[in-house]
Each structure stands twice: as C-alpha cells, then as structure tokens.
Amino acid sequence: EPSHFHCRAPQPGPAGPAQAPAGRGTHPAGNGHRHQAAAR
C-alpha cells in the first residue's frame, strides 16, 4: 500500500508498517483525507 506508507512516512520505520493496520482502524477517514490533501 503506497498510499498508507506515505502517510506513515514521518513515523519511524519499524513502527510504520506495524502501526499501519492499527492506524487505519483508529482513523480510516482521516488517513484517506490526509492522503488526498497531500496528493492534491
């Protein structure tokens, strides 16, 4: 998932992929919104 990885780019490498599934559940809408805003 390149989009998810991009959002987690600022976070630490080891925590990025590990927190990916958890973060999505925590704020699925926020993640998508953030990516769209950055891609725009």
Image (cartoon, rainbow, N blue to C red):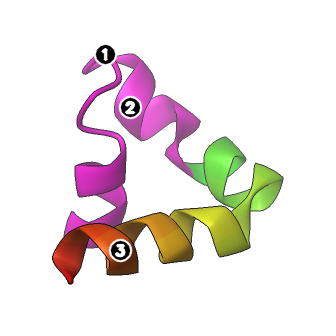
Q: Nearer the viewer, mark 1 or mark 3?
A: 3
Left or right side of 39 for 37: right
Q: From the viewer's perspective, is residue 1 above or below residue 18?
A: below
Q: In the image, which residues are magenta?
A: 1-20
| Amino acid on which the number 2 mark rests in the picture | Gly
Question: Who comes first in sequence, dot 2 or dot 3?
Answer: 2
Q: CA distance from mark 2 to mark 3?
A: 20 Å
Residue name at image x 35 percent, y 41 percent: 8
Q: From the viewer's perspective, is residue 37 above or below residue 12?
A: below
Q: Give percent across and percent down for residue 31.
A: 54, 63
Q: From the viewer's perspective, is residue 8 above or below residue 40?
A: above
Question: Who comes first in sequence, dot 1 or dot 3?
Answer: 1
Q: Which residue is mark 3?
A: 37
CB atoms of marks 2 and 1 within 8 Å:
yes
Q: Give percent across and percent down for residue 6.
A: 23, 54
Which numbered disc covers residue 16?
Answer: 2
Whether the magenta-drawn stretch holds residue 9 is answered as yes
Residue name at image x 65 percent, y 46 percent: 23
Which numbered disc covers residue 12?
Answer: 1
Q: Secondary structure at mark 1?
A: loop
- Quadrant of the image containing the C terminus: bottom left
Q: CA distance from mark 1 to mark 3?
A: 22 Å
**Front position in the image: 5 or 34:** 34
Q: Give percent across and percent down for residue 1.
A: 29, 69
Majority secondary structure of the magenta segment? helix
Q: CA distance from mark 2 to mark 1?
A: 6 Å
